[in-house]
Amino acid sequence: MDLKMLYNPFYGSEKLNPEEGETKEIGLNTRIDDKTTFSAHYFRTDSDNLIGFNNVTWKYYNAGAETIKGWDVQLTKAFDNHFSATATYTHTYIPAASATVNPNRNGYIPKGQYDLTFNYDDTKFNGSLNIKGIVDRPGSKSNEAQVLDTYKSIWTANLALNYKPVKGMNVFFKLNNLFDRMYTDMTYDMRNPGGVGWYSQPGRNFVAGVEYTF
């Protein structure tokens, strides 16, 4: 909770109570062999006094209690002294607050997330390629049928390269959104890409530069 939620003259509410909750987690971490590790975790978060935003009154309010359940698995493999890969999957489930909405906060939190990262690390050069998949995020139940499947599940990739020719110097190159996917991390209406309520992430873009530490 921040001050604008309490005191903003247009949508603040001085009657807001802070969110409360606790998280419980149990997990397993094991080394399969000298080059392979595996981990798995189950977690549960019980929260109360959740803060929501009422689109009718345009005010923040305490929306009640919520339970989040989920699990994740991770596998890391080193192929040699330079090259390794890590694969992770996280599953999240939040029961629907009523029959008129989807689970996972009316479909705006994905039920599944995949992360696959390839790393190369040498004395002067290192690089990484990360592929991320956000799956099963249909949006609100009332609008779900109008949301394209390509926006319910999104796959993106980012590439980062670093080269250190001499001590103290780093030449870097980052290529973001390699597949030039149109997607959003923040939206309250997934039917209208680029329109009202849709906050698009940048398309394919890159950053290059040189850093020097004295």
Image: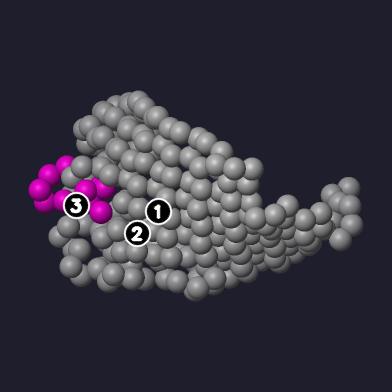
Q: Position of residue 130 (x, y in %)?
A: 55, 60
Q: Earlier in the sequence, mark 3 or mark 1?
A: 3
Is 115 left, or right, of 210 in this rendering?
left
Disc 2 to disc 3, how far (Cα)?
15 Å
Residue 113 image label:
1
Q: Are marks 2 and 3 in contact (CB under 8 Å)?
A: no
Q: Earlier in the sequence, mark 2 or mark 3?
A: 3
Q: Position of residue 37 (x, y in %)?
A: 55, 43
Nearer the camera: disc 3 or disc 1: 1
Amino acid of disc 1: Gln
Quadrant in the rendering for residue 9: top left
User: Which residue extends farthest left?
Assistant: 99
Q: Position of residue 87 (x, y in %)?
A: 50, 53
Q: Are marks 1 and 2 in contact (CB under 8 Å)?
A: yes
Question: Which residue position is annotated with label 2?
Answer: 135
The quadrant the N terminus occupies is: top left
Q: What residue sits 56% from the left and 38% below the top?
A: 31
Q: What residue sits 50% from the left and 35% below the top?
A: 29
Question: Which residue position is annotated with label 3?
Answer: 102
Compared to 70, does 140 lie above or below?
Answer: below
Is 170 left, or right, of 94 in this rendering?
right
Q: How dense is the environment of label 3, judged by Cα within 10 Å: few (below 14), some, or many (20 and up)?
A: many
- Residue 98 is one of the magenta-drawn residues: yes
SS of the residue under disc 1: strand
Is 40 left, or right, of 110 in this rendering?
right
Disc 3 to disc 1, how far (Cα)?
18 Å
Amino acid of disc 2: Val
- Residue 179 is one of the magenta-drawn residues: no
Q: How dense is the environment of label 2, judged by Cα within 10 Å: few (below 14), some, or many (20 and up)?
A: many
Over which residues does the magenta segment extend?
Answer: 97-107
Disc 1 to disc 2, how far (Cα)?
6 Å
